[in-house]
Amino acid sequence: MLWQFKPYLLLSLNKDLAARGRTQNRTPVLPPIYVLAVAVVLGLKVLGIVLVSALLIIPTASAKLFTRSTKSLLILSWFSPSSPYLSASPYP
């Protein structure tokens, strides 16, 4: 698909511009657009999962650097500034 990028770009912008660029109008435009849309949606889902897991792991990992006992680790990780438990969201 990368070697056919220019025809897809020309066809997606303007069919007259593609005709001047000697690009065949028989090239299907919608399937690559659907593939791109699915790739973007899946990429955003994966990025969201990674960010949420990092939001849960970072407070505990940073609190572990400053504590020696499990009790103080839990207290410090609960009240750290990056903790998701102290967010400004009105939703629990």
Image (tube, rainbow, N blue to C red):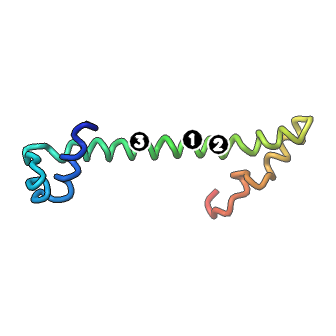
How far is the residue under mark 2 from the one under mark 1? 6 Å
Q: Secondary structure at mark 3?
A: helix
The local secondary structure at tag 1 comes to helix
As shown in the figure, which amino acid type bears the numbered disc 3?
Leu
What quarter of the picture does the N terminus occupy?
A: top left
**Residue positioned 68% across, 43% down in the render:** 56
Left/right placement of residue 89 relative to residue 60 reads left
Label 2–label 1 contact, CB within 8 A: yes
**Amino acid at circle 1:** Val
User: Is 79 in front, or is 30?
Assistant: 30
Query: On the image, which quarter does residue 15 sit in?
Result: bottom left
The quarter of the picture where the C terminus appears is bottom right
Residue to which mark 2 is pinned: 54
Residue under pointer 1: 50
The answer to which of marks 3 and 2 sits earlier in the sequence is 3
User: What's under tag 2, amino acid-wise?
Assistant: Ala
Q: Residues within 10 Å of mark 2 (few under 14, many from 20)?
A: few
Q: Position of residue 70 (x, y in %)?
A: 87, 35
Residue occupied by mark 3? 42
Q: Position of residue 72 (x, y in %)?
A: 89, 42
